[in-house]
Image (tube, rainbow, N blue to C red):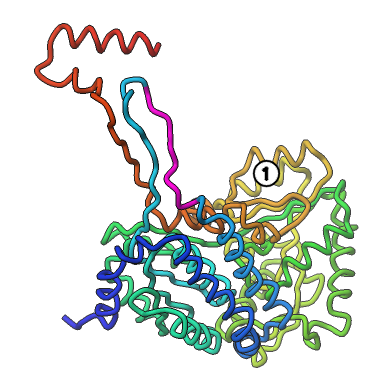
Amino acid sequence: MKANPYQQLFDDQMDRFLKVGKTTYKERVTKLKRLKNALEFEYKQPLRDALFSDFGKPFLETDLTEIYPILAEIKHIERNLRDWMRPKKVGNPLPMIGSRSYIEYESKGVCLILSPWNFPVNLTFDPLVSAIAAGNCCIVKPSEFTPATSQVMAEIVSALFDPSEIALVQGEVETAKALLELPFHHIFFTGSPAVGKQIMKAASRHLSSVTLELGGKSPAFVDETASMETTAKRLAWGKCLNAGQICVAPDYVLVTEKAKGAFVEALKNQLDSFFPQGASHSESYSRIIHTAHHRRLQDLVNSAVTQGARIIYGGGNTEEKHFFEPTLIDQVPEDAALLQEEIFGPVLPIVTVKDVDAAVDFINRKPRPLALYTFSKNKGAIRKLSTNTRAGTACINHNVVHLSNNHLPFGGINNSGIGKAHGHHGFLAFSNERATVRQYTPSSIDLLMPPYSDLKQRMVDATLRWFK
């Protein structure tokens, strides 16, 4: 059998993880501060240039969505990690009198982080920051579709960390497969539900725990009580950010009959306002990652049109430049691929519904989404969507912004993910919560050990009556 090319790297980290797991608050924060300084100063411009080279990401968008979130995450951890690391005392039931119960937070060990191409810096370093905070060793494998960015990240990791503690490896699918053959203690994957199933299958061979940040079709609901101008502005921004290549982008809009005309008009006006010379001439608009994904978007739109859908805005695209114009499409049949698959691009289907009840029915016919966006001033409608649907995350009268709150857990449910990330929830994802009991005095349990007797039975019965 051919030797695994990453076996030695993995073994080196296995030899070290217990030592790393015993690092103090100060030692962990020192590592994080080095990373923060590297991103904020020495490597900020190289990362901007690399992301522009990989898929035309504007510098401001890089700062806003790639670099700033990591700086904010590290600052949040600096302020809170000491408290997170402390054992947490919990209560005891009466039969355990004379003991102390508490939860200890220990590192999981050697972790694998597989990150995607759409936010390569953010979605590589965010879980890595959590893993470092929890005291783990890590092997990180970023996407092969952003080679310039992956190379800069490799330089950052090699400059800051000993590879027996933190290492970044580059490669294509075969690299990921080789890594998944190794018995990692935890795997953190961000990507599509289809690949997430493969990750989970590979993890099951070693009973590795997993955090899966997936995607799915995140709906937005708009009714006639919403502010059309504000709603259109926020949804247009959420859909055009990174050219729609974001797991929490609004994937389709369910708009009531009474709101549709005004909403569509406001949305068109907002897109014109964002890109007055057209998106193809704008320095504020990203490109599609590669030709295969561009063709996939073309096929989704063309197939929907063939089935009777109508493009009501945009639709222009240039394959050789990987450009795809913001596109609004109406009258899409529900069985069209455009309403079945996650779009992951700047195409927004508009679906007309009678009311909030029809919207709830539509959402519940599909797998559980990563995010649910409600635009309404009607408290009843907001409550109905919240209580009668299930989603990993939600925003009311906004979209996408919940990712920037380090106090909130981020993650999906079922098809859209398993486990949570960010802030304290990221620390917990990479920690084992060890339940510990320490006995200080003679234990009442000692009185109930074999051989059993009538007296011991009466003691048990009396205890049970006490708790009725």
Q: Which residues are magenta?
A: 84-93
In this view, 345 is above or below 49: above
Question: As drawn, is 181 to the left or to the right of 106?
Answer: left
In this view, 230 is above or below 396: below
Kindly indicate the quadrant of the structure image that contains residue 443.
top left
Badge 1 element: helix
Amino acid on which disc 1 is placed: Val
* Residue 80 in the image, given as x and y percentages of width and height: 56, 55
Please count the marks in the image: 1
**What residue appears at the point 71 percent right and 46 percent down from the top-left corner?**
359
* Residue 116 in the image, given as x and y percentages of width and height: 51, 74
Residue 251 vs residue 61, the one in the foreground: 61
Residue 291 vs residue 33, the one in the foreground: 33
The residue that disc 1 covers is 360
* Image quadrant in which the N terminus is located: bottom left
* Residue 254 in the image, given as x and y percentages of width and height: 74, 53
**What residue appears at the point 61 percent right and 89 percent down from the top-left corner?**
46
